[in-house]
Amino acid sequence: MKFFIIAALVAFAAAADYAPKYEAPKYEKATYTPAYAPKYEAKYEEVTYAPQPYSFGYDVQDKESYNDFEHNEKSDYNVVTGSYRVALPDGRTQIVTYKADAYGYTADVKYEGEAKYPEYVEKQYKAASYPAPAYSAPAYKAPEYKAPAYVAPVYSAPVYKAPAYSAPVYTAPAYKPKTSYVAAPSYKAPAAYPKY
């Protein structure tokens, strides 16, 4: 028995040494290049342009939307100057003249006209006077009813039949004398009581 156990252990150890060893698969990035792909690499470079002189101006006057403003600006290579004008709701016109250069932005603000704040007056409503409505009485026709014609009901006197009863037939009961009676109980006189 010991021989079989030792032989089994030796066989198991030998099989463990010869077992194949597997490694985890390694995945590589696919490098597929289609035939129509370009043969060069794209390079992106930031394009910068030298500052250019410019000037523009526009104005808007729209009475329906109460828009009234104007803007003008010009620049040589280093200094930007301009002005804009806006009509304010209080009736004044704001004029801003500005300059922007290497030292920063400076603005000069002026106002033309005088601010007006009209006093609010609440509207007075008058009650409308309407004439009293004239209603004419409606003309109704008198209803025409026809008197209903009633027919006097006709009753027929009921006919009753006298009930017919048949006299009951009674049979005299037949009594049979009882032949067996229960014997009257017999009592024995008690024996004389012993004297103590």
Image: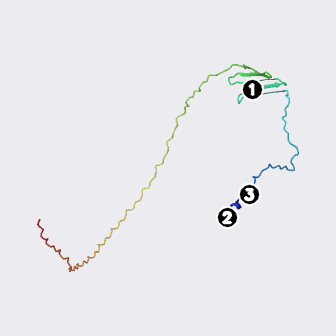
Question: Going 76% across and 26% down the picture, which residue do you hit?
Answer: 70
Q: Picture coordinates of residue 19 (x, y %)? A: 74, 58
In the rendered image, the quadrant that contains the C terminus is bottom left
The kind of residue on which mark 3 rests is Asp
Which residue sits furthest left?
A: 195
Which three-letter amino acid code belongs to the residue tagged 1?
Phe
Q: Which residue is mark 3?
A: 17
Regarding mark 1 in the picture, which secondary structure is present there?
A: strand
At mark 3, the secondary structure is: helix
Give the side of residue 62 with respect to residue 177, left or right: right
Residue 192 higher or lower than 14, as above or below = below
Q: Which numbered disc covers residue 3? A: 2
> In what element is the residue under mark 2?
helix
Lower sequence index among marks 3 and 2: 2
**In the displayed structure, does residue 133 sit left or right of residue 149?**
right
- The residue located at (77%, 26%) in the rendering is 71
Front residue (pair 37, 81): 37
Name the residue at 80% across, 25% down.
73
Image quarter for residue 62? top right
